Image (cartoon, grey):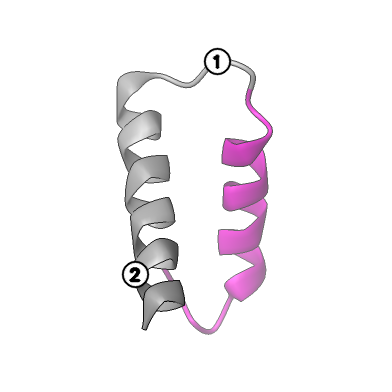
């Protein structure tokens, strides 16, 4: 992640969320993102 170019991250995340079929690696990335969101929400 490059904080100087956050649009690139958002574009990649949008592409990941909109994919109909994720492979195992993409599923693990999604799980990590959602776990981080859940942890920050609980605090």
Q: What's the residue at 64%, 60% (across, down)? A: 10
Mark 2: few/some/many CA within 10 Å (<14, 14-19, 20+): few
Which of marks 1 and 2 precedes in the sequence?
A: 1
Image position, residue 5 (x, y; %):
58, 76
In the image, residue 28 above or below residue 3:
above
Image position, residue 12 (x, y; %):
58, 49
Segment tinted magenta in the rendering: 1-19
In the image, residue 7 above or below residue 18:
below
How many marks can you see?
2
Q: What's the residue at 31%, 29% (across, down)? A: 25
Q: What's the residue at 55%, 15% (across, down)? A: 21
In the image, residue 36 above or below residue 15:
below
Asked if marks 2 and 1 touch (Cβ < 8 Å), the reply is: no
Which quadrant does the N terminus fall into? bottom left
Which quadrant does the C terminus fall into? bottom left
- Nearest the camera: 23 or 6? 23
Q: Does 43 lie within the magenta span? A: no
Question: Which residue in the structure is indicated by mark 1?
Answer: 21
> Is residue 19 found left or right of 3 in the rendered image?
right
Question: Which residue in the structure is indicated by mark 2?
Answer: 39
Mark 1: few/some/many CA within 10 Å (<14, 14-19, 20+): few
């Amino acid at each position: 992640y490059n904080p100087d170019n956050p649009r690139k991250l958002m574009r990649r995340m949008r592409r990941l969320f909109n994919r109909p079929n994720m492979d195992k690696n993409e599923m693990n990335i999604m799980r990590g993102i959602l776990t981080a969101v859940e942890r920050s929400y609980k605090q």
